Image (cartoon, helix red, strand yellow):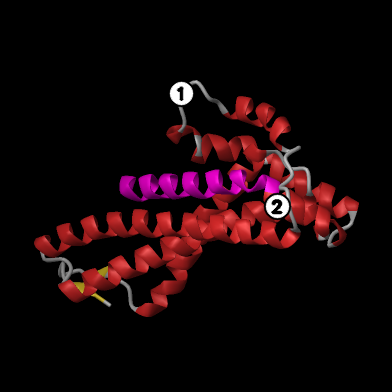
């Protein structure tokens, strides 16, 4: 559905943007001990995988929400400057900064998904294909999974830097953005066990 694509694009932009802002803090964690988790060959392999898919990921998730003049290749090229950023202070402070950033992004994801789910529920209640209890359940599920998915995308992007070091900010953006979309889809499947809204052949919803 078009609405789902719009929500995914908004959420992914929030997750990717916040992850990219945390490159410095994540680099501090890498320098403080993250570089000892993986071998150099393993770090290089992970970075190569992330960078290989970054331009395609940016084209899918980021460009529709960015100014027309900014293109994926340009973002990837400009990222070299951002990789030199290292957060000042201790690794503990960097962890707090990342947690704060992920929490802020999760809050935005909660609002984005919750708002779209609310509009959808109102329309379906008025059409008679969803009752009020199902509407409330639908909004709660979408808002909660939206928050979790957005926060997960931020942590995934920051975690990539914390474990591998020199990753360009646009690559981190792409990892965070696509990670949030993947997390949302996985969470949607998981919450199916809660008895989600499902339209029945008669037009009434079932759980």
Instruction: Give 141 or 163, whichever is nearer the viewer.
Output: 163
Q: Residue at x 10, y 61 (%)?
A: 126
Q: Is residue 156 visible?
A: yes
What secondary structure is found at the residue carrying circle 2?
Answer: helix
**Which image quadrant: the C terminus?**
bottom left
Q: Residue at x 79, y 54 (%)?
A: 30
Q: Which mark is residue 158?
A: none
Whole-percent x, y for residue 38 in the image? 85, 59
Instruction: Give 43 or 186, whichever is nearer the viewer.
Output: 43
Q: Residue at x 63, y 48 (%)?
A: 22
Compared to residue 199, the image places residue 115 above or below, namely: above
Whole-percent x, y for residue 107 in the image? 42, 59
- Seen as rendered, the residue at the extreme top is 69
Q: Residue at x 23, y 73 (%)?
A: 134
Compared to residue 24, the image places residue 130 above or below, namely: below
Q: Which mark is residue 26?
A: 2
What secondary structure is found at the residue carrying circle 1?
Answer: loop
Magenta residue check for 2: yes
Direction from residue 50 to residue 9 in the image, left or right: left
* Pointer 1 with pointer 2, Cβ within 8 A: no
- First to last magenta residue range: 1-24
Q: Which mark is residue 68?
A: 1
């Amino acid at each position: 559905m078009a609405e789902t694509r719009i929500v995914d694009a908004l959420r992914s932009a929030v997750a990717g943007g916040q992850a990219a802002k945390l490159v410095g803090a994540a680099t501090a964690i890498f320098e403080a001990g993250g570089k000892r988790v993986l071998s150099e060959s393993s770090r290089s392999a992970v970075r190569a995988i992330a960078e290989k898919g970054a331009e395609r990921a940016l084209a899918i998730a980021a460009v529709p929400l960015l100014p027309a003049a900014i293109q994926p290749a340009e973002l990837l090229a400009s990222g070299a400057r951002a990789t030199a950023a290292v957060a000042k202070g201790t690794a503990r402070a960097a962890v707090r900064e990342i947690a704060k950033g992920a929490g802020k992004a999760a809050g935005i994801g909660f609002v984005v998904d919750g708002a779209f789910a609310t509009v959808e529920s109102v329309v379906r209640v008025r059409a008679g294909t969803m009752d009020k209890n199902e509407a409330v359940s639908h909004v709660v599920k979408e808002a909660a999974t939206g928050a979790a998915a957005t926060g997960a995308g931020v942590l995934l992007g920051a975690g990539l830097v914390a474990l591998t070091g020199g990753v360009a900010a646009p690559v981190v953006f792409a990892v965070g953005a696509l990670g949030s979309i993947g997390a949302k889809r996985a969470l949607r499947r998981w919450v199916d066990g809660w008895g989600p809204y499902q339209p029945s052949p008669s037009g009434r919803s079932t759980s």
